[in-house]
Image (spheres, rainbow, N blue to C red):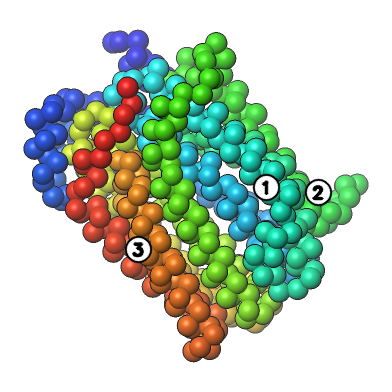
Amino acid sequence: MSELSERERSGMADTMQLEAVEIGTDEFLKEYSTKRSKTKAVPEGVSTRGIYRDIVHIAWPTLIELTLAQLTSMFDLMMVGNLGQTAIAAVSIATQPKFILNTVFASMNVGATALVARCKGAHEQERANHFMRQALVLNLFFAVISMVVGLVFTGPLINLMKPPSEATFVGGVSYLRIQMYGIMPLALTFTITAVLRGVGNSKTAMMYNLVANVINIIGNFLLIEGRFGFPRLEVEGASIATVIGQSVAFVIALIVILRPGQYLRLSFRKSFRPDFTSMAEIAKIGIPAMFENVIMRVAVIIYTRAVTSLGEMNYATHTICMNIQALSFMTGQAFATSATSLMGQSLGRRRPDMGEIYTTYTRRLGLLVAILLMLVFFFFGEQIVSLYNDSTEIVKAGGQILMFVAFMQPFQSSQFIIAGGLRGAGDTRSIAIIVMITTLGVRTCLAALAIYVLNWGLPGAWIALVADQLLRSLLVLLRYNSGKWKTIKVKIA
């Protein structure tokens, strides 16, 4: 057994089924690139059970990690919710500008994941580590810029969200300003998580993010209402607890990649000098993803501004339901992580047929989970909403909105997974175009029509969101079935 193979088995996600197939030849790639995407029988030596095992090996730690992170966000809102509707609105309004400022380094991580995954599939360990170092340098630079912009323009960023009251504006400014001090450790942790997922090691990221979430919840308990002698800081306390948790996660993540014997290992003996050629490869995949995220955030801001015009009660209901919907995102995103990593590794091994097989089987697993979530939201909507707020009006309205969330589950899951496979192939440009069409062209326009013209209220806003998701699911599927992702060139050596 080679030294490389031994290292791949030491704590890393070893895609045994992919290793069982021969490396693709130029003739194989030329022939396969002309075929339209469709479900295929697995190659000789590969088992269906093994395919599912590879998918779940990456997906389950990611699912736990993302779910716990979203549950922590839910607990944040539940704890802040005890302070009233204004506090809920303040935290929600501050979250959107934070997402915008996170966009650049989050997008570059898409490129880092895809490239590191290809290196793993091609057995280019040193190149994988090189791309990790370059991604860290690149995102540290972007994080510093984001922090400065966030601190200087805190007020205008909150005003973009059209806060419904002065108290909401003040609370949002306080929350966002504190978040800016944690943006550098957050950015670097995101990068480490992205490259670990690229090689299939999602379990490690789960562990350090679990610690961060626990610290966040404890901090919320102590600082929001002031317990055990700690000061009562309310919304500011929730923000401080989040930053502390993020900082601890970064320290643990850094320790992980500094340990010897890892497939991905950060060594300070290696050069951290910017390699603009490698950074350009990261950016080639990351920039379209950045446009996608920017477009998404702009659309969400426009959409949210329309919802805030419905008043604080409706906006609080909307915030709660969006938070619950985000929890349902976790399963789709977890399986999408598997699709991204396994597609990238398959293409690195010059076996797009394996990437296609992994994506197909991942969609099947995702659909089963989506149906389960659909039933939960349909039958227990009001009970879930009541965990956030005991207002009869909010609980009833929220239960109705969760019917929309239930309906979207199967489409949403398939969309996430297919898009994950396309990102693993480096096809981020098409995803960006699709998001622009559906969010700006459909969601925002339909929401404005439903709220300002037809007076459909909050249900009208969610009808627009459902229309966005359905069209996006269709367009992503059509792009994937076109097979154009098979011919995208990515330079890893």
Q: Name the residue under label 3.
A: 472
Task: Determine crowd level at label 2: few under 14, some 14-19, many 20+ residues with C-alpha closer than 10 A.
Answer: many
Q: Is residue 409 visible?
A: no
Q: Can residue 349 be seen in this view?
A: yes
Q: Which residue is drawn at 51% across and 24% down?
A: 274
Q: Mark 1 points at which residue?
A: 149
Q: What amino acid is found at the position of numbered circle 3 in the picture?
A: Arg
- In-front residue for pair 116/216: 116
Judge left or right: residue 72 versus residue 360.
right
Q: Position of residue 348 (x, y in %)?
A: 27, 29
Mark pair 3, 2: CA separation? 42 Å
Q: Residue at x 69, y 65 (%)?
A: 159
Q: Residue at x 38, y 40 (%)?
A: 285
Q: Mark 2 points at which residue?
A: 222
Q: Where is residue 225 in the image (x, y as percent from the top left)?
A: 83, 56
* Residue that protrudes farthest toward the bottom in the picture: 454
Mark pair 1, 2: CA separation? 30 Å
Q: Dividing the picture into quarters, in which one does residue 57 lie?
A: top left
> Sequence-wise, which precedes: disc 3 or disc 2?
2
Q: Position of residue 41 (x, y in %)?
A: 13, 43
Q: Dividing the picture into quarters, in which one does residue 233 lie?
A: bottom right
Camera-nearest label, 3 or 2: 3
Q: What amino acid is found at the position of numbered circle 1 in the picture?
A: Val
Q: What amino acid is found at the position of numbered circle 2 in the picture?
A: Leu
Camera-nearest label, 1 or 2: 1
Task: Determine crowd level at label 3: few under 14, some 14-19, many 20+ residues with C-alpha closer than 10 A.
Answer: many
> Sequence-wise, which precedes: disc 1 or disc 2?
1
Judge left or right: residue 209 versus residue 348.
right
- In-front residue for pair 53/250: 250
